[in-house]
Amino acid sequence: QKEVEQNSGPLSVPEGAIASLNCTYSDRGSQSFFWYRQYSGKSPELIMFIYSNGDKEDGRFTAQLNKASQYVSLLIRDSQPSDSATYLCATNTGNQFYFGTGTSLTVIP
Amino acid sequence: GAGVSQSPRYKVAKRGQDVALRCDPISGHVSLFWYQQALGQGPEFLTYFQNEAQLDKSGLPSDRFFAERPEGSVSTLKIQRTQQEDSAVYLCASSEVTGVGQPQHFGDGTRLSIL
């Protein structure tokens, strides 16, 4: 079992809709959780991090963490074509960072 | 520069050759990580430095892989006697410190192709 699991997609949403990306993790000792965006051929770019249960909002992005269910999600409101990318979920335990395989998102104009 | 810098951006080598990949982290960042990313996969942890100390090398796939950061800033990942399965993008990331909520900042990576 991988440390971090994501649905690889692809996920397609129309422009202006809400995109919902999900991630589960196996290590209950995970301390912090990250969402990265990766455009094709580019490096991962940090979008948000969260380490407390509940929601954290930053502009059009909301990260949700439920440690009891070992579940992290990212909501993107008012999706734009420029949001089309692969979204990587990552967890951190001590010095170790574990990444999921990523979910491919396409926002259709 | 302001970000993590990696060189070369692309490297092609014949099977059996040695390669060296360089990472210049953000100035002042204590922690430095190396990852290997295969096509369609997420980054896989290779090794971690805190300043010049290599605190975790559990992700290095074989003893052909070696990393160093002798002065606590620039790091080099060396792969000896390269094999075709070493073909991947090698990403370097740095963070100010390591701890809860400390995000990593990635370089653009080195795309390694072994022929």
Image (tube, coloured by chain):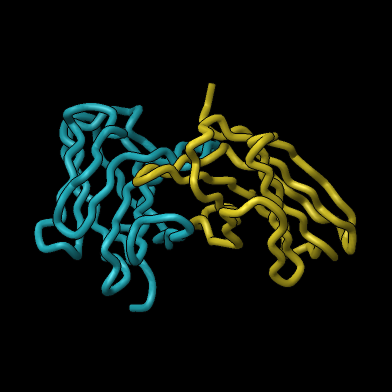
Chain colours: A yellow, B cyan
The percent position of residue B35, horizontal first and vertical second, equals 37, 44
* Outermost bottom residue: B1
- Nearer to the camera, A22 or A38: A22
The percent position of residue B32, horizontal first and vertical second, equals 29, 56
Can residue A39 be seen from the camera position used here? Answer: no
**Looking at the image, which residue is at 28% across and 43% down?**
B47
User: Is residue B5 shown left or right of residue A93?
Assistant: left
User: Is residue A103 shown left or right of residue B82?
Assistant: right
Whether A4 is drawn above or below B32: the answer is above
User: Is residue A94 shown left or right of residue B32?
Assistant: right
Whether A109 is drawn above or below A26: the answer is below
* Total count of labels: 0
**Looking at the image, which residue is at 45% across and 55% down?**
B100
**Looking at the image, which residue is at 34% across and 44% down?**
B112
**Looking at the image, which residue is at 22% across and 47% down?**
B77
- Nearer to the camera, B5 or B50: B50
The percent position of residue A32, horizontal first and vertical second, equals 51, 50
Q: Quadrant of the N terminus of chain A?
A: top right
The percent position of residue A97, horizontal first and vertical second, equals 43, 44
Classify residue A51 by image quadrant: bottom right
Can residue A13 be seen from the camera position used here? Answer: yes
